[in-house]
Image (cartoon, rainbow, N blue to C red):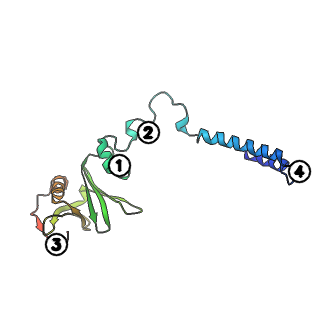
Amino acid sequence: MAAAYRELAKLHHPDRTADDGARMREVNAAYDAIGRSRRDKGPVSVANQPRRAGPAAGTGPRATPGWWLAPTLRRQLGRELLDALQPREDVLLVADASTWDSPSVRLVATDRRLLWLRDDAPVARVRFLPYRNVDEVEARYSRRGRRGELRVKPLDGRRLSFAAMTPQTVETMLRLLRPRLPGGQPPKPQTNGGGA
């Protein structure tokens, strides 16, 4: 189509012919009309084609990330965390927290692992740690007991801290996580400390 337009433009351009350019305006108008009709139809894709009989891959409820979760929970998690979930991975608790490298973190405890979304990070926003790789979890509270910190020690020794949570949220996390750790870690005594 573009090649045909170029040929007609060369043939009828006012710089090459003695007329006033009326024929070139007609060619331009026709080319614009054809282009507009193609744009209105939209891009051609497999989705616009008639469907074959039988279920197609990627259709139905399982095509939606987190299809097994309640709609309110899916909205709370957001697209990035839903995409990071494994099929039928149950979400036990969702909490807002902060880490040393991100003041805004969405922490998710599932039946298999911890996931967290670093809201202010431009890349590698979602991180995770399977419970099989966790050595221990413990709580730490501010002096006045208004804020809690979940401290996670992976087997590789790099301690993770999720701070700025309520003490109730930290306690709930501990109750959910400890039975899922290798060996079912027993509860540790609560420790008070500054800074959280």
Q: Is residue 39 placed above or below 146 in the rendered structure?
A: above
Q: Residue sitting at 80 percent across and 49 percent down?
A: 9
Q: Label 1: how many residues lie within 10 Å, few (<14), some (14-19) or many (20+)?
A: some
Residue annotated with mark 4: 17
In the rendered image, which quarter contains the N terminus?
A: top right
Q: Label 2: how many residues lie within 10 Å, few (<14), some (14-19) or many (20+)?
A: few
- Give yes or no for contact between labels 3 and 4 (Cβ–Cβ under 8 Å): no
Q: Callout 2: helix, strand or loop?
A: loop
Amino acid residing under circle 3: Gly
* Distance of label 4 from label 2 (alpha carbons): 56 Å
Q: Callout 1: helix, strand or loop?
A: helix
Q: Callout 3: helix, strand or loop?
A: loop
* Distance of label 3 from label 4 (alpha carbons): 86 Å
Q: Label 3: how many residues lie within 10 Å, few (<14), some (14-19) or many (20+)?
A: few
Q: Nearer the viewer, mark 4 or mark 2?
A: 4
Can I make out residue 154 in this image? no
* Distance of label 1 from label 3 (alpha carbons): 35 Å
Residue annotated with mark 2: 58
Amino acid residing under circle 2: Gly
